[in-house]
Image (tube, rainbow, N blue to C red):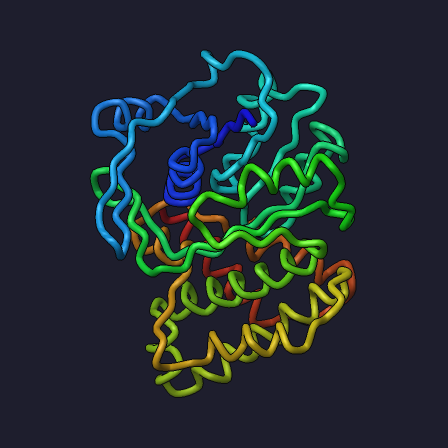
Amino acid sequence: MRILMAGAGATGGYFGARLAQAGQDVTFLVRERRYQQLQASGLVLQTPQGTETLQPQLAQASSLTGHYDLIIVTVKSFALDQVMEDIAPAVGPETLIMPILNGLRHIATLQQRFGEDKVIGGLCKINATLGDNGEVIQMTPLHQLYYGALDGNNDARLQRVDAALRDCQVDNRFSDNIMDELWEKWLLLSTLGAVCCLARGNTQQILTSRGGEALLQGVFSEILSVITAEGYQTRPAATARILELLSDPANPMTSSMYRDLTQGFDIEADQVIGDLLLRAKRHSLATPLLNAVDVNLQVYLQQR
């Protein structure tokens, strides 16, 4: 299977490297700066087990040739419009596109551009970031990759994807209910991002502060009410596990959005929080805490 990894940041770099190490034909589609960096130093993985370096196949938008069987999109959500233009020449009649982005807005955007039959569900769970020299730093052993048909019909096309991905040294989950997994990932990451960005700290600091637990639980409840109104079929055991994970003061957690914010980078405010508010408005739901978070993030973006 010919695979195009759109992006070679922490997510794309890690999972793309694992696919390449497993013998898959993987090409990384990157911008000029990242292209030069990877050409010079290779793709470096720093994991809890040690450091690994590989020489990846690289391409830029201007040099893409031929169609790919699978395109995995791993860029930040605010870069999606440009990436869709970049990958368009690589999309053929049999190409499947698997986005690993935060939120859910990107699914409809990709379907409108390339067709509903081409987009499949995907998400990952990994604590990773890029180091100062472009190395991919996996901070904990967690490295889960979920994928499946959005309608639950994992037909022969999806079976081929699973065959290519299942042996790539990560914890793979071939799901027949990927939409619930996507809703639950959004519940986790948006609650985490909201409270960390608003309080400017990790969950341990928040939970040990006066009113911190009430803040986290209040944000969680607002988000759960929104995604339920939007079609999430609540799985009580799953949502309870998410809240338990977030509420453990012995396990300090931060979100990628918070880490980007503290470094002065652009953030996925509209895609992670703003889209929830739009959906809440559609159902006349009161979300005062989410509104406070959204204002906070908008001010940050104005001040960048």
Instruction: In the rendered view, tell whether residue 159 sits above or below residue 280.
Output: above
Q: How many numbered marks are there?
A: 0
Q: Residue furthest bottom?
A: 210
Q: Residue at x 68, y 77 (%)?
A: 236
**Horizontal and vertical percent position of residue 4:** 51, 27
Q: Residue at x 44, y 48 (%)?
A: 267
**Horizontal and vertical percent position of residue 140:** 33, 60
Instruction: In the rendered view, tell whether residue 191 sits above or below residue 57.
Output: below
Q: Residue at x 43, y 54 (%)?
A: 143
Along the line of sight, the residue nearer the viewer: 237 or 31: 237
Along the line of sight, the residue nearer the viewer: 29 or 261: 29
Determine whether, in the image, residue 165 is placed left or right of residue 51: right
Determine whether, in the image, residue 106 is placed left or right of residue 292: right
**Horizontal and vertical percent position of residue 32:** 34, 21
Instruction: Please state, as top left, top right, bottom left or bottom right, where the N terminus lies in the image.
Output: top right
Along the line of sight, the residue nearer the viewer: 25 or 100: 25
Rendered image quadrant of residue 176:
bottom right
Along the line of sight, the residue nearer the viewer: 94 or 86: 94
**Horizontal and vertical percent position of residue 282:** 77, 58
Instruction: In the rendered view, tell whether residue 302 sits above or below residue 180.
Output: above
